Amino acid sequence: MNNKKRGVLVLYSGSSGVGKGTILSELLKRDSSIRISVSNTTRSPRKGEIDGVHYHFVTREQFEKLISQDGFLEYAEYCENYYGTPKKPVEDMLDRGYNVFLEIEVQGGLQIMEKYPDVLSIFILPPSMDVLEKRLRRRGTEDEETIQKRLDEAKREISFKDKYKYNVVNGELETAVEEILEILHKEVSNNN
Ligand code: 5GP
């Protein structure tokens, strides 16, 4: 994809358990211009998560070293762990014309909005808080205390939804995916 116009940076947020990951996998299957930034995190891998694919799993020391080298586009502490977007791979993918999704929480999202005021920002909402709680429990990967913490965090995050240019409700997966593709294609054509 050389000599292409620079890709669009997409800030993609929504509370834990809202189905962001599932939507993203569908988007990737359907649109070859999309790439996902792989974040660094200090949290432990969940079952089935692969280092270098879902995250780069690193120690606090490694994370803090990259902070000191100004290696992150943004980073934040969330539920007692660091999460951050490494700068270089994102810049490289954008230069090669790919549309790059940053799946990050709102503290990092606000940093991105400041640095890139033109960022295409999308916030994914659950159809209701009850549905969100059910989805979080069904995942079954976290203990009760963590689930409660994530639910509180979800409420706090949802209060930032109006800072994002687009809000998309994930009620029916297909509808949410179509809506995001439409938003992306509109933005890409405005960008050309
Ligand atoms: P999880 O532990 O469920 O994978 O992620 C927790 C939260 O951290 C999610 O809202 C996810 O979008 C966010 N997150 C993942 N990577 C990053 C990152 O690089 N930076 C920031 N700020 N948040 C991230």
Image: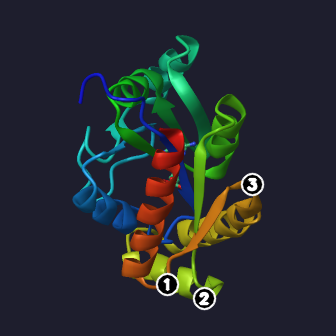
Cα distance in 3D space between marks 3 and 2: 23 Å
Residue corresponding to mark 1: 171
Instruction: Characterize the local packing of mark 3: few (<14), some (14-19) or many (20 or more) Cα atoms within 10 angstroms.
Output: some
Assign a secondary structure to mark 2.
helix
Residue at image x 45%, y 74%? 176
Cα distance in 3D space between marks 2 and 1: 12 Å
Q: Which mark is residue 136?
A: none
Q: Amino acid at mark 1?
A: Gly
Residue corresponding to mark 2: 130
User: In x, y percent, where is residue 117?
Assistant: 69, 36
Q: Earlier in the sequence, mark 2 or mark 1?
A: 2
Instruction: Characterize the local packing of mark 2: few (<14), some (14-19) or many (20 or more) Cα atoms within 10 angstroms.
Output: few
Q: Picture quarter containing residue 90?
A: top left
Assign a secondary structure to mark 3.
helix
Residue sitting nearer the eye, 125 or 33: 33
Badges 3 and 2: C-beta atoms under 8 Å apart?
A: no
- Do we see residue 79 in this rendering? no
Assign a secondary structure to mark 1.
loop
Badges 1 and 3: C-beta atoms under 8 Å apart?
A: no
Q: Amino acid at mark 2?
A: Asp
Residue corresponding to mark 3: 163
Q: Nearer the viewer, mark 3 or mark 2?
A: 3
